[in-house]
Amino acid sequence: MTTTPVPGGCPAHTATTPVPLGGPAVHTEPQALYRTMRHSYGPVVPVELPGGFPAWLIVGYRELHQVAGDGELFPRDVGLWNQWERIPEDWPLLPMVGRPMPSIYFTAGAEHRRHSEMVVPALEAADPFEIREHCEQLADRLVDGICARGTADLVAEFAEPLPVLVLARLVGFPDAEGADIARVLKDLADGGPGAQEAYGRFGEHMRLLVTAKRETPGDDVTSRMLADPESFTDEEYALDLMAITAAGHLTTADWISNSLRLMLTEDQFADSLAGGHRSIGDAMNEVLWEESPTQILAGRWAVRDTQLGGRTIRAGDMLLLGLGAANTDPLIRQEMAVGGAVRHAGNGAHLAFSYGEYRCPFPAQEIAETIARTAIEVILDRLPDLELAVPAQDLVRRPSAFLRGMNALPVRFAPVQTTGAQL
Ligand code: HEM
């Protein structure tokens, strides 16, 4: 790391050589890497994305708050990126960074608000009791698929399929199609050669759903979106439905599996395994602070040249929101310390759902919480003697700098009977 002084920056945080954003350190021990970055670079770190593309990673809580809170200067407008001319068609991060397209996730400013004012009320109107019922029913069916066996991988067989099955029901798919949407999203997340084809199938499912709900509306998110007086094209509805499902499935899956991992490995959560519901909430909240499912979010793009955390940001530069890093910024941690220990319980000031006009919509956060909490309650209720089937240190993280989850969560338990429900 070179130490050329940064004009206007803290003299202790002067490194300028971009940090490559990839490799095992960022996958397995991101917090150690964030600490080093903060020490050597300060709150705004020059990084290099795979392929050699520059970006700024914001690791400071205050600076992240400032950027996410200023949608005028730092919109989520990927079209502003000053690297587009250099980006190859097959760049592996392209699906995650995205391209300008008419959906809630890839529009900015007034156009984003137009989508948001149609999508968010449609999510908000979902009945929380019904969502809970869907979650219980679908979670029970998934547990039925594993409970007689005595062993399972809770990522592949429970935490990953459950959120997508619930979201598929909420947007209006019949259950039979929910299972296919789950497969499509798995192929997409795997990012292999099947990803492009999976994306096509994902869009086709949503287009057919829009047509079906236009003909026969129901009590679901899609029908409510279509009933909004503002008019959108069918392609826009389909893209918004894809955004809702894609934004919600892996994030919620990781919230479930990271919380279960914590409960299965840390003594302080032993109570939860014996049915202590308060501890479930504590574990879930601790995960949002310590292991935010969205560790790094791409991102925001600067509208004009500006200064941030002692760095000169150029118009069109990409800013990556280091949500996981900002949550552990010593600045905010000092405020959370009670008697020398950090207290997460009841503290919702984390940035796991981001902040500002593009943050995860509040009704979506509530849906995520209902899915995750119900999932954990059902699994602990049905398999009360659940334990890890491998030593905790052998659990493997997903090889991603952006999403924090596990490849697998192998568990064992005394086999029990199914409830007889079918998927
Ligand atoms: C633990 C679970 C979840 C996490 C950690 C999470 C996190 C996030 C984050 C970080 C963003 C981007 C915010 C930004 O750019 O500032 C986002 C956006 C979004 N999320 Fe979530 N999310 C979760 C669950 C869900 C669920 C279940 C849904 C759907 C029901 C959902 C729907 C959305 C939508 C529609 C957006 C785009 C909002 C906009 O552009 O206005 N999310 N989420």
Image (spheres, helix red, strand yellow):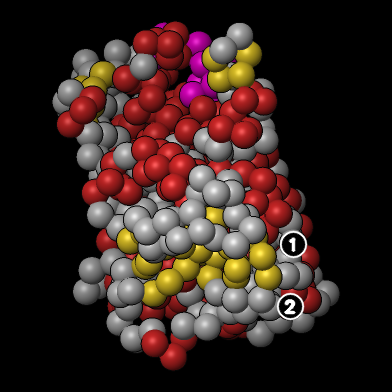
Does any portion of residue 238 appear in the rendered image? no
What residue is rendered at 30% in x and 58% in y? Answer: 22
- Where in the figure is residue 141, as x and y percent of width and height? 37, 37
Is 41 positioned to the left or the right of 195 in the image? right
- The three-letter code of the residue at mark 2 reads Glu
Quadrant of the rendered image containing residue 90: bottom left
Q: Position of residue 243 (x, y in %)?
A: 54, 66
Q: Which mark is residue 70?
A: 1
Q: Position of residue 269 (x, y in %)?
A: 43, 14
Q: Would residue 406 be found to the left or right of residue 256 on screen?
A: left
Which residue is at 46% across, 42% downward?
39
Residue 304's place in the image compared with 174, above or below, is below
Total count of labels? 2
Res 259 → quadrant: top left
Query: Percent position (x, y) of residue 132?
Result: 58, 36
Residue 178 is left or right of residue 27, and the answer is right
Q: Which residue is mark 2?
A: 111
Contact between marks 2 and 1 (CB within 8 A): the answer is no
Magenta segment, which residues? 273-283
- Judged from this view, the residue extending furthest toward the right is 229
| Mark 2, secondary structure of its residue | helix
Callout 1: CB less than 8 Å from ligand 1: no
Disc 1 element: loop
Q: Nearer the viewer, mark 2 or mark 1?
A: 1
Asked if residue 43 lies in the magenta stretch, the reply is no
| Structural distance between the alpha carbons of marks 2 and 1 | 17 Å
Mark toward the start of the polypeptide (2 vs 1): 1
Residue 221 drawn above or below residue 389: below
The foreground one among 280 and 339 is 339
